[in-house]
Amino acid sequence: MLKIGIVGMGVIGRHVAEAAARSIPGVTLVGVSVREPSTAAGFPILPLHQLLDRSDLIVEAATQAALREFGPTVLAAGKHLMVLSVGALVGVLDVHAAAAKTVAAEIGAMTGREHVPLVADVSDWASVHAAVQSFTTRAGRLDVLVNSAGGGFGTHGLFATRTQADIDSVVAVNLTGVLYATHAALGPMRAQGGGRIVTIASEGGRIAMRDLGVYNTCKAGVIAFMRNLAREVGGDGISTVTVCPGGLLAPKLVERMAAWPGPLASAIDQGLAATPLGRFGLPDEVAVAVAFLISDAGAYINGTELSVGGGQSA
């Protein structure tokens, strides 16, 4: 039986624990805390020296935000927040005000801190620049940008059958939005002497898939953009990394499965068969990857991409 030790039992540490418990059959979890030993998390939380003796694998889940009184400020551009940071002030940017408020409230309930909902269209230059400036003014700085806005599966299909509107809508959010939001973040990050930019792409940006030519091209584009940008802004103390999820078992996907036609249902089976681990990923697993990349432990990772796809692009 695999025993995993988790260092840092704040929000991220518990998030890691929950994901591990759901994803790894028979796993035994052991946490570590600077406080007194306890079992409040549902599994032992021990002093560090005991954790080292009782674990096969150590997972560092404490971000820089957990190590100082005031954590970094994080701006997540997209409806689904991929980062949960202890002590961080989080700005949640969405084109829909209600969605931004809902996610900000959910993060607040988990962290015990009020966060900032922001409304902007990432494909609108003036809109996204104004939102980033508003958040930076309120927070006083911008340590992390997470580009997680995306979509376009509703316009999937053979490229020859796509309309101009289909193509423009996918490119606007998945490629143009990343360029615009990143451009808006560079000013404050350079002024303060550094920052981290994490962009959520897709395994589709690394491999070919039928019916997703436009979407996958956008994802390949942001992978290349993050690599090129690393050469431009590294001297300013800014790192850029791309995370490439595979198929995720997100709530909306579950809701849509029942209504999908036969061919798409078959495509799901094919997708699972093409993934060596033979399962969908969990949003939690992407969240943990992003949390690692913005932590001190991930500070030297730059200008590259991290696959969180179960081996789909292997």
Image (spheres, helix red, strand yellow):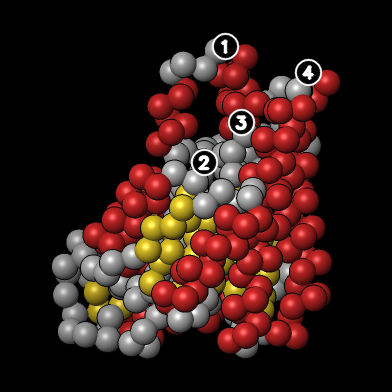
Image point 24% across, 74% down: which residue?
A: 45
Q: Would you place residue 210 above or below residue 132 in this image?
A: above
Residue indicated by mark 4: 161
Q: Give the amino acid at mark 2.
A: Leu
Q: CA distance from mark 1 to mark 4?
A: 20 Å
Q: Can residue 299 be seen by looking at this rendering?
A: yes
Q: Quadrant of residue 111?
A: bottom left
Query: Which of pointers 3 and 2 lies earlier in the amino acid sequence?
Result: 3
x and y percent of residue 195 in the render?
Answer: 59, 78
Q: Give the amino acid at mark 1.
A: Gly
Q: CA distance from mark 4 to mark 2?
A: 26 Å
Q: Which label was assigned to residue 74?
A: none
Q: Secondary structure at mark 1?
A: helix
Q: Secondary structure at mark 4?
A: helix
Query: Which of pointers 4 and 3 lies earlier in the amino acid sequence?
Result: 3
Q: Give the amino acid at mark 4.
A: Thr
Q: Would you place residue 220 above or below residue 268 in this image?
A: below
Q: Secondary structure at mark 3?
A: helix
Residue indicated by mark 3: 153
Name the residue furthest top: 262
Q: Nearer the viewer, residue 160 or 264?
A: 160
Residue indicated by mark 1: 262
Image point 57% across, 55% down: which residue?
A: 127
Residue indicated by mark 2: 248
Image point 75% across, 72% down: which residue?
A: 230
Q: CA distance from mark 4 to mark 3?
A: 14 Å
Q: CA distance from mark 1 to mark 3?
A: 16 Å
Q: Would you place residue 177 above or below residue 230 in this image?
A: above
